Structures are given as C-alpha cells and as structure tokens.
Image (cartoon, grey):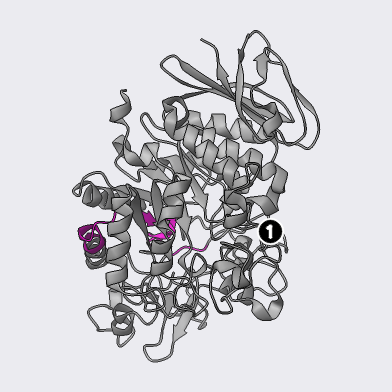
Amino acid sequence: MEQKGFLWWQRGIIYQIYPRSFQDTNGDGIGDLKGIIRKLEYLHWLGIDVIWVSPIYPSPMKDFGYDISNYTDVHPLFGSMADFDELITRAHTLGMKLILDLVPNHTSNEHPWFIESRSGRDNPKRDWYIWKDAQEDGSVPNNWLSVFGGNAWEWDEQTRQYYYHAFLKEQPDLNWRNPEVQQAMYNVMRFWLDKGVDGFRIDVMWHMIKDSQLRDNPLNPDYTDLQADYNRLLPVYSTDQPEVHDIVRQMRTLVDNYGEKVIIGEIYLPIEKLVVYYGVDNLGAHLPFNFQLLTLPWEASKISSAIDAYEAALPVNGWPNWVLGNHDQQRIASRVGLAQAKVAAMLLLTLRGTPTIYYGEEIGMKDVPIEEDQIRDPQGLNMPGKHLSRDPERTPMPWDSSTYGGFSKEQPWLPLARDYKRVNVQKQQDDPFSMLTFYRRLIEIRKKEPALSIGSYRPVYSNHQLLSYIREWNNDKFLVILNLTPGVCYFTPAHIDLKGTIIIATHSELEGLPLNGTFGLGGDEGILVKLEE
C-alpha cells in the first residue's frame, strides 16, 4: 500500500486528556475547555495528532462525567458550547483531530430518559432501561455484580421493580435491545459529528448488550480477596454478548457516512475476543483498544509473545494499537519505575499500530498518594481498604514550578505530586535529557520515518531480559532493542547479521555508536538503530 493509503488514525498519535486535571483557567481548581485551548500549542509542539477528551457533558459527577444527564451539551464546570466550538476550530487549524468520549452503555439517573422510565411501568420509556421483578423470595433478579462494588440491582420502591446498573446505582444501564434507544444514541453521535468531531472513544463497548435471559454469572475460580468484588464472578452473561457486534457495526456505518472518522472501543477482553470487535470485513470498531501493556507483567518474554500473538490474531487489514496508561489504570512510571518508563515509551512509539499517550506520561508523572479523606473516586470509596481508587492517576498536570504547578491559581480538586516543582513541563522542555525531550524526539522520528509509523513488524530476538524487532518500509529498516530489566543483557541474534547506527537511545551516550551483529545493553537501556541497506 502507498503511504497515502493510510488514514490519519493509522499514522497519528493519540493523546488522552482528562479535562478535570489538565488546565484550570477560571480558578475553581478544576480543568476546563479553555485550559485545553490554552495548551493546544504545547500539544502541537510535542507532535500530537489526535486529542481524545474524556467526558465534558452535563453530569451530577457521581463518576466524574461518566454519568451523563445530557448528551448534547457541555457541563458549566468545563465551560460552554462556544468554548467547545473554539476548541475544535483551533485544533483543526493546527492540524490536529479531536475525538470525544461517548458513554452509551448507561446514563445518569438524573437524565430525563431515566426520570421518565422510572415514573411508571406504563411509561413509553420504561423499556429504555433494564427493569426486572424481584425473585419470589424478594431477592435481586440474578447474581450480577457492580464494577464499583455490591450487587448490580437497585430497588425502586415506587414501581416495585429492580433496575440494572453495571456501575453506580446512579448509572442505570440502557436497554440496547430497544431500537428506540439505539436511534436516540445514534442521534447523539450525529449531533457531535455535525459539530465536526473526528470520532468517538466508546466507553465500555463490551458491556452494551446483556444476556436476554439475564442468567446468573458463574463463580471465578481465580478470585482473591485483594481483587475488586466484581471479580468474584465471570461476567459471561452481563458482557460481550454476540448481538453487541451488530450495534458496533451500526455505529461504524453511521460515522463512515461522515467521511474519515474513527471509532475506538474500550474493551477489556482477551485478545481472541478483542479482535472480533474489528467486525466482519473490518466494519466494526476501527481500533478496539489493546490494553495488554496495561495488564501484562513487565517481562520481556511475556510481552514479546503477546506482541506476536496480537499480530497473528489481527484480521486481514485490521490495524493494531497500543496503550501504556489511562484514567483507570496505574501510571506506567509507577508500575515499572521511571527508568523503565523510558523503555516503555520507546516500545509504545516504535511498535506497529496507533499509540495512545495518557496526559503526563510524557513527563514521567507517577501516581500520587491520596489520603483517605481526599478520595473522590467512587470505586475507592465503595470498596474501602482495597486501595482501588483511581484518583492517584488522575491528579493535575504540573506545568511549571509555581504554586499549584501552573495548573490552577487555587487549590486543585486533587493534590499535585509532591515533586511537581522538579517534575513539570517547563523544567523538562529545555532539558535535553528529560523524559519530555525523549518523547518529543521519538514522536518526531516516528512522524518522519514511514517505517516507524506504517511499516511492517518483524520480531528478531527475545529472552527473559530483552526484546527486539525490525520495522521496515520499502528500503528503510529500523531495529529496536529494549532491555526490560535493570541488569546488563546481550543482544545475540543467531543466523542474522545486522549492522547500523544507534540514532535514539534511552541513554544518549549510546547515540551515534555502531551496531555490528551483537550488542551489550546496560540496565534499563533501549536503542533505535537505523540499519544499513
């Protein structure tokens, strides 16, 4: 395929913004749309192509925007619709795309749809949600659990039935088997597409259809008390039902009518199930999110095997993608350490497929300790003692060394990292050895070299310490060697003679050195080699 045959979402780099924590401009301690606008030049400087903005819709904020009370407006906390229009205009002017987080599985219990639905059993919107009678003994309809703890059924005294909520009781699940629900949500998508958004990240895509018989989920034989309560059961009937793929295909058809748009699906499933979401003839989700680098042990042999298995499982013409972090998972620098976070950055930005960067990863942000009386996340509040709060990875972005890190002039909604005066954007922009500089250089060469953005992937050699692979486009070849341990290791491929020059390395002292066959790497080192023809 010619270079021009690849679409923007295949060549580009996605950057996730959690708007509450990115930049506050009105002094309420919460980030806003004008804050994102203010930092567009920074994102352009970094080399970002696509901005993914987490929910900005009106919401009671029980789950910080993932409980939506109006799908076609902007929460006053974040600004106005005029601010949104300015954001998308300015992003497009800078050559960047903008995608929105869409939450179609559930609404807020304050959404007008649900208020109508619970007003009476004969209300026309009753079947827009999942209502069920109690069992004969008065107990809940089945054993399904809420992701945020406890059972997933809430009793409504007025209408004498239970409604289902996969998350908070304030987040009732929509009944996606109802065609009226489908059309209502498709109209929401049309509203934002008409405004010029470039696509959607679809929240909990694999949850959208439930078993029609509402059968009990089986016990999870691998559950331990350290895990979330939800993991007590295997959600085989409450998620990933076959009919969900019909819904995804309809969404895809809708966005395709608007030209080159993208659908990204949030799907936490094993690879063999994940790839089904590409759909028949690749007419499902463009990018079913691949979360393996979030969940796998940071071990070279396991990651190398997972990459190969993923590449093998992809459907013909299915485009891969990779993620190191998001608003629901521990930050990469906290999971693997700051030194390995550089290695992880090189992995993310040299693998085949679309990379997604979570805000702050580019400066090496770590999880921030949140005291018990500061916890805001319902997942942490509902399961005390298990340390499952997602607040530590959602803390404010430190822009400089000033009070509150240049994020706000007032106390932020969550505390900043203790080291924000040393770890911030301003400090790192002028430091040639910083994490930010390293990210920018990797992004720059990825955009410059087709081999690194759209080229083929070929594994070379891996063991218990390192993994290596070649990216190739036409006559250009690049070798990546990554040491995923703090100990010395050796690149010793058999039956292959590779020669070239190191052009980017986690440790800059290596840059410019030749590679001739074998090579020894120090701990936490990674190198990108331009191979000779």
Q: Quadrant of the N terminus?
A: top left
Viewer-nearest residue: 511 or 486: 511
**Residue range of the region highlighted in magenta in the rendering:** 189-216
Q: Give the residue drawn at x 51%, y 10%.
A: 533
- Indicate yes or no whether the magenta region holds residue 457: no
Residue 502 falls in image quadrant:
top right
> x and y percent of residue 104 in the render?
35, 64
Q: Amino acid at mark 1?
A: Arg
- Secondary structure at badge 1 equals loop
Q: Is residue 430 above or below residue 448?
A: below
- Indicate yes or no whether the magenta region holds residue 208: yes
Tell me, yes or no, if residue 304 can be seen here.
yes
Viewer-nearest residue: 423 or 521: 423
> x and y percent of residue 16 in the render?
47, 55
Tell me, yes or no, if residue 289 can be seen here.
no
Number of residues whose C-alpha sits closer than 10 Å to that of mark 1, classed few (under 14), some (14–19) or many (20 or more): some
Q: Is residue 258 left or right of residue 493?
A: left
> x and y percent of residue 243 in the render?
34, 52
> x and y percent of residue 125 in the render?
26, 77
Q: How many marks?
A: 1
Q: Is residue 153 left or right of residue 184?
A: right
Q: Give the residue drawn at x 71%, y 30%.
A: 509
Viewer-nearest residue: 365 or 372: 365
Q: Which residue is mark 1?
A: 422
Q: Give the residue drawn at x 46%, y 53%.
A: 42
Residue that protrudes farthest toward the right in the picture: 487
Q: Is residue 481 above or below residue 32?
A: above
